[in-house]
Amino acid sequence: MDGSAIEITTHASINGIAPADWDACACPEATSGRPVDPFTTHRFLKALEDSYSVGAGTGWQPRYLTAQQDGQIIAAAPLYAKGHSQGEYIFDHNWAHAYENAGGRYYPKLQIAVPFTPATGRRFLTRPGHEAVGMAALIQGAVQIAADNNLSSLHATFCTEAEALAGAEMGLQPRIGQQFHWVNDSYGGFDDFLASLSSRKRKNIRKERETAHGFGGQIVALTGDQIQPAHWDAFWHFYQDTGNRKWGTPYLTRNFFHFAHQTLRDDMMMVLAIRDGVPVAGALNFIGRDTLYGRYWGCTEHHACLHFELCYYQAIDFAIAQGLARVEAGAQGEHKLARGYLPVPVHSLHWFADAGFRDAIARYLVAERDAVDQEIEVLTSYGPFRKTDREEQQ
């Protein structure tokens, strides 16, 4: 590649970027199958925007970033101007309070992220062959935009470990958090997974599954054209119930699920618990090339263990059947540990305009990183998997 100039552009709408140009950076592998990451595809971001889940009044103002060289977009990033810290799942509320208590203005800030989606994936999207120069151009461009507009900070959340390492070399501050993921150890079926667990945990999961299936109805897993518009009507009620309890106001609009049905249903697996012909609970997953991403759950009736079955065990069943490498079950939740989901690090990158605040954050991140590493080690040791044959005999 030659050294011709790279032009950085911000876009107020994803509709101003051709889907082929965006996806050539976000998911070039999709020409021969599923994208690795369904959340950075043009169609997913467009569904968020066209449904007004992001945009004016949401605190997520699109400023999509592209880097162009010799008339071709070589890199892109889902960049947003943020008016708050909601819907991010890597929390900086304490940073905001400290910054404003010191007399600064933390918001608006810039965020490279997929809104409302705590799933790891590339955030600096580059065409094959342009990885290093593309990422460097996007970081330099985003930092320059923040500086030129007197913004407090720039954040890239749920980036890959490789991006975190590269970003740190470019002067951004890396941060480590934690999630719980299930890993497919070439299991031939759910019973093979159970066989890898300690006897007590294996019995507990079998009991939970039996209890869940005794709720008085049937549990179905739907994908693609099996998902019908009526299913979205039911799922909207589930999503509203969970959103109102967890966040105060649901992040996604009803129209998002309308657009999801039109353009995203092949990327989705919906699990429904149906009693007397009526869905009473549901879980929604997105399907990547090697990962199933658990996203939303809700119910209109409460039944013992149904949440575990729909969100965790049905996801494992699907991943094994489809040969997927892992299940990412979303943010938080140490209760996932007993169900075979182990702690793993998640990564983010941060830049602050104020040098003093930047130094304070650097010290904080060192201490936080040590604490997260220790927590992951301790939690892993309490995992449900068999450790010795003697334990199995107890």
Image (tube, rainbow, N blue to C red):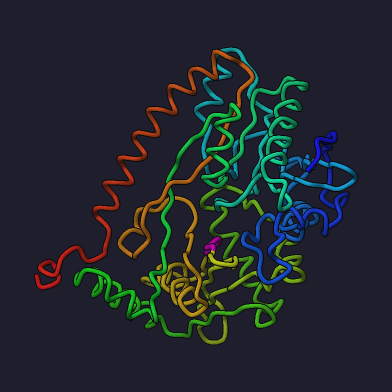
The residue located at (68%, 73%) in the rendering is 266
Q: What segment carries the magenta color?
A: 293-297
**Quadrant in the picture for the C terminus:** bottom left
295 drawn magenta:
yes
Residue 84: quadrant of the picture = top right
The residue located at (30%, 40%) in the rendering is 374
**Quadrant in the picture for the N terminus:** top right
222 drawn magenta:
no
62, 121: nearer the viewer: 121
The residue located at (33%, 74%) in the rendering is 193
Question: In the displayed structure, does residue 343 sit left or right of residue 20?
Answer: left
- List x then y, in percent, for residue 149: 77, 22
Q: Is residue 56 visible?
A: no
The residue located at (26%, 63%) in the rendering is 384
- List x then y, in percent, for residue 58: 72, 43
Spot the residue most to the front: 2
Question: In the displayed structure, does residue 325 sit left or right of residue 266?
Answer: left
Residue 278: quadrant of the picture = bottom right
- List x then y, in percent, for residue 236: 64, 66
Question: In the displayed structure, does residue 183 sit left or right of residue 279?
Answer: left
Q: Is 44 rendered above or below residue 389? A: above
Q: Main secondary structure of the magenta part?
A: strand
Q: Is 128 rendered above or below residue 167? A: below
Question: In the displayed structure, does residue 209 sit left or right of residue 270?
Answer: left
- List x then y, in percent, for residue 339: 34, 65
Q: Is residue 138 visible?
A: yes
